[in-house]
Image: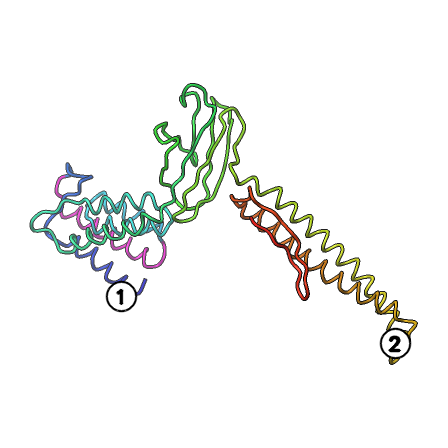
């Protein structure tokens, strides 16, 4: 964000607070009009929050703006709080604060700064929504009803109404736990990127369903095994090549006699095998490491095949 945009944000907040009229927020319709001292306190909190936002101190900005909003529920302040939450990666909370700002009910003499803030909240909420990840939690073998178990997402109890349907979550790592009484009978963690949707399936009988992710693991170890064998072959052939080269260095001064032809052929063969071995080894280890890191969900059709040709070596496969 440019310094001009930051100054404009700052000015919008101040303009909203200095406006003599008072807008009514739908979340605080019963709140009486703020007195001068309360407005002054809210103004100072908003100024401090805007300054913290400008310096990249988003958690501090969020806390200050939240306090300011509780004193004076202006859409300008709520908008800035939503932006701070979004910067913190707390997309779900940010969306709710954008929603609060855009649903503000205006009076006939409300400030143009408030109107601009409501329009900005509506636009920015539309841009944020596609970025919010969606997670579906499926619980199998839970008996007659889900009331027999407790499902927790990041430590919070998930309402039964949200089991089996998509729910918005923040980007990042999430942990789902299924408990029966005090006993954990299922547990799973996954990471969701912006805009990603995924499903976690847990078995309430105690077995954790890994979906398709776990299927990549055998292929990863196969690739690593192929890679390890390739590296070992390359190393052994390299030693043979060096031994042959040492013999040829002694005999070929300056040209190789006919009696050294076998050593020369052996050197060339060992060099080729070493090159192929190291090539297969590097590719295999790379593929195996990648599969372990990414745990691809499409490995039910995975296969690996070494490919050798004139001037190239590698692995061909589908993951």
Q: Main secondary structure of the magenta part?
A: helix
Q: Nearer the viewer, residue 132 or 290?
A: 290
SS for tag 2?
loop
When asked about the image quadrant of residue 308, the answer is bottom right
When asked about the image quadrant of residue 12, the answer is bottom left
Comes first in the chain, label 2 or label 1: 1
Residue 44 located within the stretch drawn in magenta: yes
Question: Label 2, label 1: how many angstroms apart (C-alpha)?
Answer: 77 Å
* 64 left or right, relative to 225: left
Q: Nearer the viewer, residue 235 or 193?
A: 235
| Magenta range | 32-57
Q: Please, which residue is most extreme toward the top here? A: 144
Q: Measuring 32% from the left and 51% from the top, which residue is drawn there?
A: 84
Q: Please, which residue is most extreme toward the front here? A: 309
Q: Nearer the viewer, mark 2 or mark 1?
A: 2
Q: Measuring 75% from the left and 58% from the top, which residue is drawn there?
A: 234
* 93 left or right, relative to 213: left
Residue 18 percent across, percent down from the top left: 15, 54
* Residue hosting label 1: 4
Residue 291 percent across, percent down from the top left: 58, 48
* Residue hosting label 2: 256
Residue 254 percent across, percent down from the top left: 87, 81
């Amino acid at each position: 964000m440019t310094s001009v945009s930051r100054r404009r944000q700052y000015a919008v907040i101040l303009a909203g607070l200095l406006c003599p009229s008072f807008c009514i927020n739908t979340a605080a319709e019963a709140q009486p009009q703020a007195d001068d001292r309360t407005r002054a306190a809210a103004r100072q909190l908003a100024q401090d929050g805007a300054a913290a936002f400008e310096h990249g101190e988003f958690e501090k900005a969020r806390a200050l703006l939240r306090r300011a909003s509780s004193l004076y529920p202006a859409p300008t302040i709520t908008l800035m709080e939503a932006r701070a939450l979004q910067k913190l990666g707390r997309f779900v909370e940010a969306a709710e604060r954008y929603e609060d700002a855009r649903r503000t009910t205006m009076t006939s003499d409300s400030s143009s700064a408030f109107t601009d803030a409501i329009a900005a909240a509506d636009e920015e909420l539309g841009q944020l929504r596609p970025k919010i990840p969606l997670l579906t939690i499926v619980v199998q073998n839970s008996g007659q009803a889900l009331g027999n178990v407790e499902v927790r997402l990041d430590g919070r109890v998930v309402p039964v109404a949200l089991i089996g349907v998509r729910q918005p979550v923040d980007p990042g790592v999430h942990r789902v736990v299924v408990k029966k009484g005090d006993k954990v009978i299922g547990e799973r963690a996954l990471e969701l990127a912006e805009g990603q949707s995924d499903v976690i399936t847990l078995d309430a009988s105690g077995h954790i369903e890994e979906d398709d992710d776990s299927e990549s693991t055998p292929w990863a170890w196969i690739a690593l095994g192929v890679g390890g064998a390739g590296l070992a072959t390359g190393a052994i052939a390299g030693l043979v090549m060096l031994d042959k080269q040492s013999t040829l260095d002694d005999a070929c001064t300056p040209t190789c006699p006919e009696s050294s032809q076998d050593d020369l052929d052996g050197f060339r063969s060992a060099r080729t095998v070493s090159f192929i071995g190291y090539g297969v080894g590097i590719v295999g280890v790379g593929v195996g490491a990648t599969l372990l890191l990414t745990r691809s969900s499409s490995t039910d059709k995975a296969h690996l095949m070494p490919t050798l040709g004139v001037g190239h070596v590698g692995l061909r496969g589908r993951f």
